[in-house]
Image (cartoon, rainbow, N blue to C red):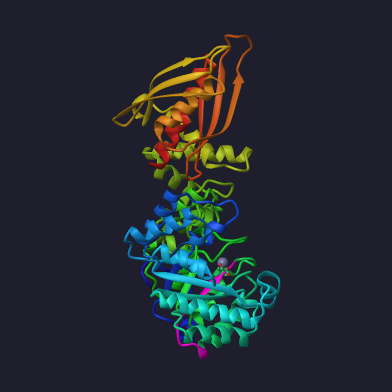
Amino acid sequence: MEEGIFVSDFNKIIRDKYKLPERVYIFDTTLRDGEQTPGVCFTYEEKLDIARKLDEMGVDIIEGGFPINSEEEERTVRDMKKMGLRAKICGLARCTFEDIDACIRADVDRIHIFIATSDIHLRYKLRMNEEEALKQAIKCTEYVKAHGFECEFSCEDATRTPLERLIKFYKSVEECGADIHNVPDTVGVMEPEAMFYLISELKKVLKKPISVHCHNDFGLAVANTVAGVKAGAEQVHTTINGLGERAGNASMEQTVMILTAMYKIKTGIKLRLLKETSRLVEKYSMIKLMPNFPIVGDNAFAHEAGIHVHGVLAKAESYEPITPEMVGQKRRIVMGKHTGKHAVAAFVKERFNLPDEKIKEVIEKVKKLAVHKKKIIEDDVIAIVDEVIGTIPEVEKIVKLDEVLIITGNKITPTASVQITIGDTKKIVASTGIGPVDAAAKAIQNAIEEKITLLNYKLEAISGGTDSLCTVEVLLEDKQGRNARGIAVGGDIVMTSINAIMDGINKIFRMYR
Ligand code: KIV
Ligand code: ZN
């Protein structure tokens, strides 16, 4: 078994059956098809940042955008090219001179031209017949080549186009100099054997390399992409986090890992950068990844059930097909209703520096709690650890609140100014808010310069009267979606709220940094 890869030996039988390519080229379209995800719009800076990361990760071709879309898009793609990345920069164009001219002005390395070829698209979208579309395809391929650019040609909706027609289009553009044929499953209507058949048939008649571009309408984008490679495709279109029109495109993370782990096919991708890149795109796209998303999801290497955790702790590959480190992930032991004592001990050891007898005490308390409470979450164990070790002593706090000044009244906007110390750095930040607690919470959040969101705030009076004690419980979430609960008790509602927030922030810092 190759280092870090623990997949099935049955895959070898399949590997030996096919003439698999040694290397597959990764064409990333996160910045073009990925940006067509409903609700996603990357800024100029975000696009350049993502391009830089894709290049660092080893992507071969970056589809930077659709330059005819706007002057801003053209400028973005042009500036991306100017960055001098190792990856080739590609621009998308319909089969019109106007679209191609925008790509030429953006000075890309490759122009990806497309024209629809299925009956439904020809009749209702293009209002052209087959001959007119073919003429347009030929004219535009010649135009791209005459200007000295690499040309990738796509028959849009290829998978609902008759095979003879597809062959006619691809062969014709090949004769005019097209460098690579892309086969889009535009509406994700293929299944793997059908994709294998289609690419095999095209392989028989085409000389230039073939690429596949699969959409995920039936959840088969990755499987179809891999089937395309098995049939001889040399290039795959993918997106980070599987972003893309409707249900998205084939995810780069899954495709690359399947090719690597199951088929031993090389890509230029630095696997350990997969998680980092996924997180960057998650942040900029503001599309939160499902925790159970393969390879890069937060749960992809998280273990909850007691038996699994025992197995994982004894020998990680018992329940892991690849090591988390390989893809830039970390193994997580999660507390849940199936949690066993091994899991509790591992969880506590990973986060806190506790002597063995204290760990035993925590396990006993967790067991007692489990009798009454079916679901034991990480927070419950953290609360028990806090109880066992007492509240975080001031000296152990990573983020300390030195001073706070709050002004509020019936005619002024509540304003808070805080001074906090993080490690050796002191920060003074002010903020306004809806009320004094909100103003202080915002000032603290701004001062720590890390996105920590207040998910829940609960205030309870312990006794009656205006001088009563109160408890405040807050639930915080950091930018990776990890939660911590902060608790404080006091006589001043505002100060108790601030102390609870500081308690939660320190728990997040202590657990994850
Ligand atoms: O899905 C599709 O058909 C496309 C084309 C532009 C290649 O994205
Ligand atoms: Zn597409």
Image x and y of residue 510, in percent: 40, 37
- Quadrant holding the C terminus: top left
Q: Is 41 or 189 nearer to us in this picture?
A: 41
- Quadrant holding the N terminus: bottom left
Can residue 179 be seen by looking at this rendering? yes
Quick check: is 370 in the magenta stretch? no
Residue at image coords 49%, 69%: 237
Is residue 193 placed above or below 249 in the rendered structure?
A: below
- Specify start and end residues of the magenta stretch as a single range: 204-215
Which quarter of the frame holds ligand 2?
bottom right
Image x and y of residue 284, in percent: 48, 49
Say how many tags the image has. Answer: 0
Can residue 313 be seen by looking at this rendering? no
Quick check: is 207 in the magenta stretch? yes
Residue at image coords 46%, 51%: 332
In the drawing, does residue 234 fall left or right of residue 121?
A: left
Q: Quadrant of residue 376?
A: top right
Is residue 428 placed above or below 63 in the rendered structure?
A: above
Image x and y of residue 341, in percent: 49, 47
Residue at image coords 42%, 32%: 506
Q: Is 44 or 424 nearer to us in this picture?
A: 44
Is residue 80 placed above or below 413 in the rendered structure?
A: below
Image x and y of residue 106, in percent: 41, 62
Tell which residue pokes out farthest to the left in this image: 424
Tell which residue pokes out farthest to the bottom in this image: 204
In the drawing, does residue 304 fall left or right of residue 6?
A: right
